[in-house]
Image (cartoon, rainbow, N blue to C red):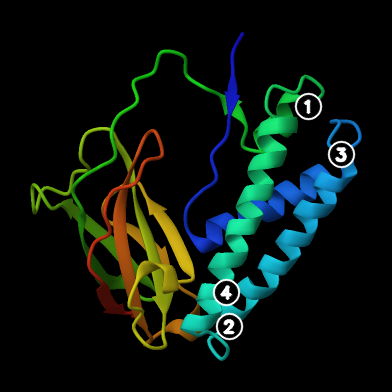
């Protein structure tokens, strides 16, 4: 019998979207899927608490290192609740139709697949200005500068970034994220961000979801 799995993405924006989607899908169908009411209530409450902290960190006027720390702590609670519901009630649940499994990001695990170790090198990233309202993410690997290739078995370059404000000291202080699968892919920005500084950190993520070390900070202005 095939076994099912799921993975929670990295990065505050992607994590928030994953959790919001899960709550939206699970809540009306919990009884059909035999998810206990208390588990749904717990997940809904922890997500609501997290979402309030998340809203503070995406607002430039209320963003601060303390707010980011509070958001990250709240996320750890949501992650525990998500893992509990997925692993104990959603995975391999025959009552969930394929379309709903796809919407929940549940998929069959590849039997016999090779588990590769986490990347050990870092992306060398440049944010280039080539068109209005966008920055191109150009990367190479620290082991082969200038090649514009990902290392073997790497799925994408994960970018965490912040627009405007004081330069963050660590990636966890950033409130935006993007997964860049091809070098020279664009990051698009709304018109009000033109002229603002973008601060970014990058790391490799392999096909098993394992992450490598973070790069140093990269800075550019939105054209």
What residue sits 9% from the left and 47% below the top?
143
What residue sits 45% from the left and 83% below the top?
193
Circle nearer the N terminus (2, 3): 3
**Which residue is identified by label 3?**
36
As measured in the structure, the alpha-carbon distance from the residue carrying label 4 to the one carrying label 1 is: 34 Å
Foreground mark, 4 or 1, reads: 4
Please state if 22 lies on the left or on the right of 136 as rendered. right
As measured in the structure, the alpha-carbon distance from the residue carrying label 2 to the one carrying label 3 is: 35 Å
Which mark, by number, is residue 213?
Answer: none
Residue 49 visible in the current orientation: yes
**Which residue is identified by label 1?**
96
Which mark, by number, is residue 70?
Answer: 4
**Which residue is identified by label 2?**
59
As measured in the structure, the alpha-carbon distance from the residue carrying label 4 to the one carrying label 3 is: 28 Å
Foreground mark, 3 or 1, reads: 3
Answer few, some or many: residues within 10 Å of disc 1's Cα (few below 14, many 20 plus, some between 14 and 19). some
> Against 75, is 92 above or below?
above
């Amino acid at each position: 019998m095939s076994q099912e799995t799921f993975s929670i993405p990295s990065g505050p924006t992607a994590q928030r979207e994953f959790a919001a989607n899960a709550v939206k899908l699970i809540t009306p169908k919990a009884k059909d899927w035999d998810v206990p009411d208390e588990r749904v209530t717990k997940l809904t409450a922890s997500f609501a608490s997290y979402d309030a902290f998340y809203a503070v960190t995406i607002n430039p006027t209320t963003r601060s290192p303390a707010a980011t720390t509070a958001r990250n702590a709240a996320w750890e609670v949501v992650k525990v609740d998500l893992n509990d519901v997925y692993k104990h009630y959603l995975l391999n649940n025959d009552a969930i139709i394929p379309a709903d499994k796809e919407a929940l990001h549940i998929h069959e695990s590849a039997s016999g697949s090779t588990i590769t170790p986490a990347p050990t090198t870092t992306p060398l990233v440049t944010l280039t200005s080539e068109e209005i309202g966008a920055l191109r993410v150009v990367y190479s690997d620290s082991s082969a500068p200038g090649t514009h290739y990902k290392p073997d078995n790497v799925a994408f370059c994960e970018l965490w970034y912040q627009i405007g404000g004081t330069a963050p000291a660590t990636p966890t202080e950033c409130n935006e994220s993007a997964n860049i699968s091809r070098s020279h892919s664009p990051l698009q920005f709304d018109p009000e961000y033109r002229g603002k500084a973008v601060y970014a950190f990058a790391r490799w993520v392999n096909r098993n979801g394992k992450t490598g070390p973070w790069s140093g900070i990269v800075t550019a202005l939105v054209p």
